[in-house]
Amino acid sequence: MHVRLAGFWLQKRGNLPAEYEDAFAPECRVETEAWRLRTAVADGATETSFSGLWARELVTAYAKGRLEDGRLCSGLHAARRRWRHAIPNRPLPWYAAEKLRQGAYATVVGLTVMHDLQHQGGGWAAIAAGDSCLFHLRAGRLVRAFPLQNVDQFSSRPALLASLPGPASSGPALAASAAGSWRSGDSFLLATDAVAEWLLREGRRAWGELLEVLEPADFAGLMEHRRQAGTLRNDDCTVVRLDVSTRGRPQ
């Protein structure tokens, strides 16, 4: 299959780029022939410590095949260990140290697309925890949204994966899974909550606007325009777009 992937992001208005706490993987643009490709986005919970780092650990783990359905428990254990080792080894103010003891939290959605030589397309599988969402598009129309399907499902307390071991309410029990098939020419969008909510509320108009985005500056302009119009919450914004086709032979 031929795959083309690009990720776009913009920090919350009023924040510096260094304060961006979402993450996506892979971070570089991809255009290649492949049997399989994995991608993910995650949203670090702002009120927790080192949540951006935790979000990056989650998307990296998924992109490397460590967090797929059936491997989530072992994959989370390894990601938690890497998160703890990646925290800067320096004294922290008491309030920062207390937050660190509570751990970091994030939502995540990961997508794996696979080629099927017997058909003009292939299959896909996804996992998600919280309100980062996957959208499967065909000819500009929504085929499926996962894990949320309408704006009423968004809340101020989404399910979150924790960077520290704890009760089931913050672990693998929260992860949902889904699977489906794709046809040549289909597109997938993975989005963190603010963009996902806007996509579900606005529908086809929003799909069309995002599918016209080609460069980071285009994405930043669109997000700011929608913020000013009041249709997009002021939050970190992240989207990964993946286009799939059968125009080439996988290698």
Image: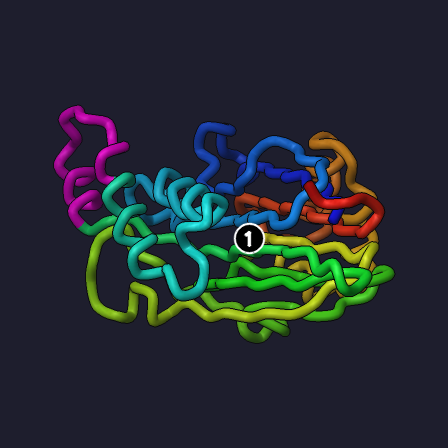
Give the total of numbered labels: 1
Q: Nearer the viewer, residue 192 or 134?
A: 134
**As drawn, is 111 to the left or to the right of 108?**
right
User: Which secondary structure class fits the magenta region best?
Assistant: helix
CA neighbours of label 1 inside 10 A, class few (<14), some (14 to 19), many (20+) = many
- Give coordinates of residue 161: x percent, y percent: 35, 58
Task: Magenta stretch: give its range.
Answer: 84-101
The structure residue drawn at horizontal position 60% and vertical position 38%, both measured from the top left corner, is 9
Q: Quadrant of residue 184?
A: bottom right
Tell me the residue that label 1 is attached to.
192
**As drawn, is 33 to the left or to the right of 77?**
right
- Give coordinates of residue 43: x percent, y percent: 46, 49
Residue 8 in view, yes or no = yes
- Give coordinates of residue 46: x percent, y percent: 38, 47
The quadrant of the image that shows the C terminus is: top right
Indicate how the structure is coloured in the image: rainbow
Q: With respect to residue 187, does 123 lie above or below?
A: below
The structure residue drawn at horizontal position 48% and vertical position 68%, both measured from the top left corner, is 155
Q: Nearer the viewer, residue 66 or 229?
A: 66
The structure residue drawn at horizontal position 17% and vertical position 30%, both measured from the top left corner, is 92
Q: With respect to residue 185, does 94 lie above or below?
A: above
The structure residue drawn at horizontal position 83% and vertical position 55%, both measured from the top left corner, is 185
Tag 1, which secondary structure? Answer: loop
Q: With respect to residue 66, does 217 lie above or below?
A: above
- Give coordinates of residue 211: x percent, y percent: 79, 48
User: Is residue 240 part of the magenta span, yes or no?
Assistant: no
User: Is residue 95 part of the magenta span, yes or no?
Assistant: yes
Residue 137 in view, yes or no = no
Query: Amino acid type of disc 1?
Result: Thr
